[in-house]
Image (cartoon, rainbow, N blue to C red):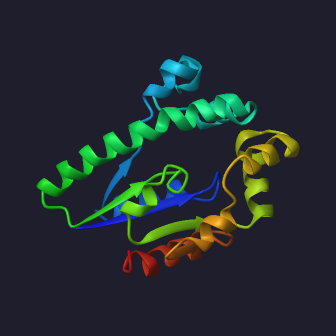
Amino acid sequence: MRIVGLTGGITSGKSTVSNLFKAHGVSVVEIDIGALVAVFGEETLQADGKVDRSKLGQIVFSDPVKRQVLNRLLAPNISTGIFCEILKLRLKGHKVIVLDIPLLFEAKMDKWTKPIDVVWVDPETQLRRLVARDRTYKEDAGNRINAQMPLDLKRSKADIVIGNTRSVEDFSEQFRRHSSKS
């Protein structure tokens, strides 16, 4: 069984790659973030029950103490929840499992994965996308980006880098090429 680590930064396109893996029949395990609601409140949920990343981001990226709380909260949930999911999928006979973990390196989960796929985007594109997605000011978006591990550092630790600065078609083609290696 092969366990692929998938990570990236805010607005890099990691969720798109995760969805592409799923669309190609690959099992993807995402971190369980239900405990976030207990700590950060119901306002972090969308109407469909999924986490509103924009609202959660506003809370944790504007306050370093809350960001540390988030990281401490996620660390045990990441390891326990993910290992349970991996075991279930392995027992079902899955040969490849993708771990979709934004904090792959920060949570030290990279030691359990090979290869490590990093979705990378240049800083200017990342900033532009975040401003557009969250309808926020450049300064706020820049602070959120700077609160994360730099994508260039993640890229340096990657086995496979999927660049996401061009068209959707180019991005999908890169995914097809790289997914055969993952």
Left or right position of 78 against 158 = left
Whether residue 163 can be seen here:
no
**Residue 1, image x, y percentages:** 22, 68
Residue 123: image quadrant is: bottom right
Left or right position of 14 against 23 = right
**Residue 78, image x, y percentages:** 40, 43
Whether residue 112 can be seen here:
yes
Residue 136: image quadrant is: top right
Q: Residue at x 28, y 48 (%)?
A: 83
Q: Residue at x 49, y 49 (%)?
A: 107
Compare residues 8 and 87 and report the one nearer the observer: 87
Q: Is 61 placed above or below 86 here?
A: above
Left or right position of 80 against 6 = left
**Residue 97, image x, y percentages:** 30, 61
Q: Residue at x 59, y 20 (%)?
A: 43
Q: Residue at x 64, y 51 (%)?
A: 10
